[in-house]
Image (tube, helix red, strand yellow):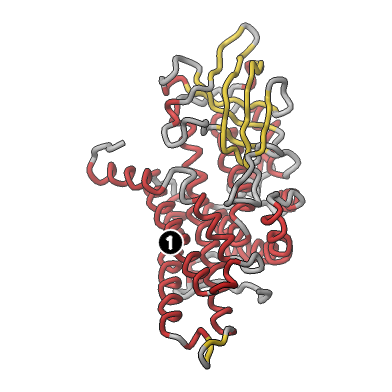
Amino acid sequence: MTERFQGVDFYDIDSLLSEDERMIRNAVRGWVDEKVLPVIQEAYVEGRFPAQLIPQMGELGMLGANLPEKYGCAGRNNVAYGLIMQELERGDSGVRSVASVQGALVMFPILTFGSNEQKESWLPLLASGEKIGCFGLTEPDYGSNPVGMVTTAKKTPDGWLLNGTKRWVTNGSMAHVALLWAQTQEIGDSRGIRGFLVPTDHTGVTARDLRGKLSLRASDSSELHLENVEVPDNALLPNSEGLKSALSCLTQARYGIVWGALGAAMACFHEAVNYSRERVVFGGTLAMKQIQQLRLADMLTGITQGQLLALQLGRLKDRGAMTAEQVSLGKRSNVNMACEISREARRLLGANGILVEYSAMRHMANLESVYTYEGTHDLHGLILGQAVTGKAAY
């Protein structure tokens, strides 16, 4: 499918965007068309991330795009940042994940919890893409319940001694620095969870690629093993305090996913519409068939609802009024919508839908991971249930 993407805008969402927001969206959209789509199919099949894209993403201001200009970032508002995530995931979830992890899970905590020295040392390098970061919170036995983490940081006369294992670490094998969360007190005491900046070439740090993925194949997913890793005191993010610090980073990343899922859904819808106009069956094109029109109508409705949700969430974030529960609703709703649209698009394409030259099944497989990571679909439902009832059920 070579037709240039023109967007999905049934409710004239563009009229609600500023000229600057549209300009940024269009610039990233063109870059995805020209640089990502020509290489992503091969990268997906081969199970590798096209690393040559990262310096370009830095040059175009996509890494930490909503963080301050004083640290070499673009200083965009949060709606513009969301539109960047939308367009990157229209290319592939793995591409959006690189920017999301770099900006929301590494640069944001350095900015929020780091020392002035840490900010000045790392943020410009990460914003340019010269250095790549990764985020280690999830462990082999602790995903949705990070309070149970067993990675420890023991105080020593010269700093800290880290031991443990982090799993499902995006960018882990290619990262220069890892932002790791560890227990500094007794296991199970969330007040003792702190963040540490650890160079990945440090003695005792071992990265291992996770093999056999059937989803997010164009993404670097790793396991980081820490064995008696000695770091100085200045490795600690001094203002990190407890699990709430780590979870605040996840809120930033989930915000990007709300927009990213839209991009995947839009790509699948665009592909399905084009295919329906071209594919001839039973004396006419698929576009003439009632069942396919109903499928396309449902896709369009879901995307339009998701666009309005994401835009209002972005405006709330720009006003400083966004809540974590609102992000949970957005992540849960838009990812579920995108999952459904990718499946319906794959089905509309028939047998051709399983070919890598079409994007629907690649997006469908990726979105199954997005459905799970950064808080599972059901866990976000329980967060919303608690917000409605005032009672925790987890």
Where is residue 289 shown, x and y percent of the image? Answer: 45, 86
Q: Depth check: give the residue in front, 189 or 208.
A: 208
- Residue visible at 67% across and 34% down? 208
User: In which quadrant of the rendered view does residue 340 lie?
Assistant: bottom left
Q: Is residue 7 above or below residue 20?
A: below
Q: The N terminus lies in which quarter of the figure?
A: bottom right
Q: What amino acid is found at the position of numbered circle 1 in the picture?
A: Met
Q: Depth check: give the residue in front, 152 or 56.
A: 152
Residue extending farthest to the top is 157
Q: Depth check: give the residue in front, 353 or 18.
A: 353
Q: Secondary structure at mark 1?
A: helix
Q: Is residue 378 left or right of residue 128?
A: left
Residue denoted by label 1: 337
Q: Is residue 112 left or right of residue 319?
A: right
Where is residue 129 shown, x and y percent of the image? Answer: 72, 44
- Residue visible at 65% across and 28% down? 118
Where is residue 59 shown, x and y percent of the image? Answer: 74, 51
Q: Is residue 182 above or below residue 21?
A: above
Q: Depth check: give the residue in front, 312 or 378.
A: 378
Mark 1 residue crowding within 10 angstroms, few (<14) / some (14–19) / many (20+): many
User: In which quadrant of the rendered view does residue 166 lie?
Assistant: top right
Residue extending farthest to the bottom is 283
